[in-house]
Image (spheres, coloured by chain):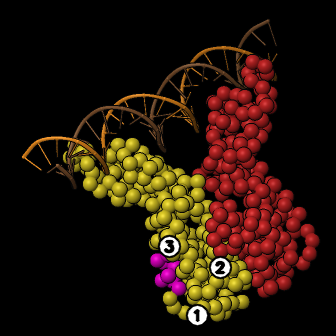
Chain colours: A red, B yellow, C orange, D brown
DNA sequence: AATGGCATCTTTACAGTGTAAAGATTATAC
DNA sequence: GTATAATCTTTACACTGTAAAGATGCCATT
């Protein structure tokens, strides 16, 4: 992109690692996961095709950092959504936030669940995943009337995995335009704002709240 | 694979279209979607790399046929699962069947929702998708007490998209091993047999049945 | 039966990809 | 000030999908 070429910046970049992450993230936002190539990311950072390997080992290494970035942003939103209202309201808000994140960052979102493109064991990824996870778990613990330190009971597990599955599936199906056939809402945002809460209300929250 | 080479079979294959579909489907079953390449499929069918283009136009053309194959198999199972029991039981059984299909054919399943790899407008695909869809819709209409010909009401839409989202998300998360952290069931099959019904029971069926 | 046309498959070629290996350059530590 | 390590480039290789053009065999028309 606006990154300097070798001639103007000298042999060493100085901040290549971050520059590559930014370039790759931009690329994902612009062209989606399928439009991403490591060479193009390097091109945008103004550096040779082989340069990224020294910082990330390879394509999965770079993508993993972006996935971690995604999980951190997701966690931030889930935490924010879990701050006000009754436990049931908070869980609902977190479900909406989950889908909203997917619609705001489709590239990141798809990447985050492509384990064939990621290094699962990478610390930064496991850490960020844990944050997002804990935000949901905390709310479910409140619903079950359990303390924050305790382990989820069986019903709590079912609720947690249930809300996650529903939000995750809804996000995927919306991004894939699979729902257009039934619910003929205009934009994806309309889907999220009206349809998704309707699902939660009709089939989840009434039981929990 | 066991397909004859040009020398032994003559210049014309005779049944290349089907042979390629079989080879590609096998490849997907063996190595998953990420292991698929058009050239490898051609190799297994014993033909040149450019041969598939004459029958399918290109890689997406071939993959679309396999996705259609997947939707037909899915529809078959959904219909079978929707034949006995109360409407609520049937919907639950269809949810389980949906996830079971995903675990039985991970390659096909992933492919079916990768619209970047498919030709959405292809008739064979739209047809097969419709079949799977109708099987679910029929059950929800029964739950709502509506006739089979009528359109789903708003609550019916929510139920339909809800069960689909939940099953779809659960399938994806299971295949991605994202649930191992909470529910430490052994195999994926255990997840499906015990955990998924628990979700449906706890949060869906009680309301509907 | 011969022949022309068409469908089918191969060959060749090209622009891409990710990344390994080795060379060039610069920063850093001693 | 010099050795060492870190950083980036160059070159090269084995892949990929597919476009273009040539080879082959089937089939219908005459």
Residue D8 or residue C27, whichever sits in front = D8
Residue A113's image quarter?
A: bottom right
Q: Is most of the magenta stretch helix, strand or loop?
A: helix
How far is the residue under mark 2 from the one under mark 3? 16 Å
Q: Secondary structure at mark 1?
A: loop
Tell me what residue is drawn at x 41 percent, y 47 percent.
B53
- The residue beneath circle 3 is B74
From which residue to which does the magenta span run?
Answer: B74-82
First in residue order: circle 1 vs circle 3: 3
Left or right of residue B192: residue A92: right
Query: Crowdedness of circle 2 by 10 Å Cα count: few (<14), some, many (20+)?
Result: many
Compared to residue D21, the image places residue A101 above or below, namely below
- The residue beneath circle 1 is B86
Q: Tell me where residue C29 appears, x and y as whole percent.
A: 81, 23
Tell me what residue is drawn at x 56 percent, y 69 percent.
B188
Q: Secondary structure at mark 2?
A: helix
* Mark 1 belongs to chain: B
Question: Does residue A177 appear anywhere in the picture?
Answer: yes
Q: Are marks 2 and 3 on the same chain?
A: yes
**Label for residue B160?**
2
């Amino acid at each position: 992109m606006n990154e300097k070429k070798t001639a103007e910046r000298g042999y060493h970049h100085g901040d290549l690692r971050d520059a590559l992450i930014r370039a790759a993230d931009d690329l994902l936002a612009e062209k989606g996961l399928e439009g991403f190539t490591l060479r193009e990311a390097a091109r945008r950072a103004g550096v040779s095709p082989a340069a990224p390997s020294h910082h990330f080992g390879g394509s999965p290494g770079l993508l993993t950092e972006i996935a971690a970035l995604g999980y951190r942003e997701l966690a931030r939103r889930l935490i924010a959504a879990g701050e006000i209202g009754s436990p049931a309201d908070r869980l609902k808000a977190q479900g909406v936030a989950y889908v909203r994140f997917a619609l705001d960052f489709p590239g990141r979102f798809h990447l985050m669940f492509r384990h064939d493109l990621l290094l699962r064991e990478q610390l930064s990824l496991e850490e960020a995943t844990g944050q997002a996870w804990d935000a949901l778990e905390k709310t479910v613990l409140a619903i079950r009337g359990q303390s924050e330190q305790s382990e989820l009971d069986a019903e709590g597990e079912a609720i947690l995995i249930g809300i996650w599955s529903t939000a995750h599936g809804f996000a995927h199906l919306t991004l894939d335009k699979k729902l257009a056939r039934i619910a003929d809402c205009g934009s994806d945002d309309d889907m999220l704002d009206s349809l998704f809460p309707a699902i939660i209300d009709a089939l989840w929250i009434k039981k929990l709240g």
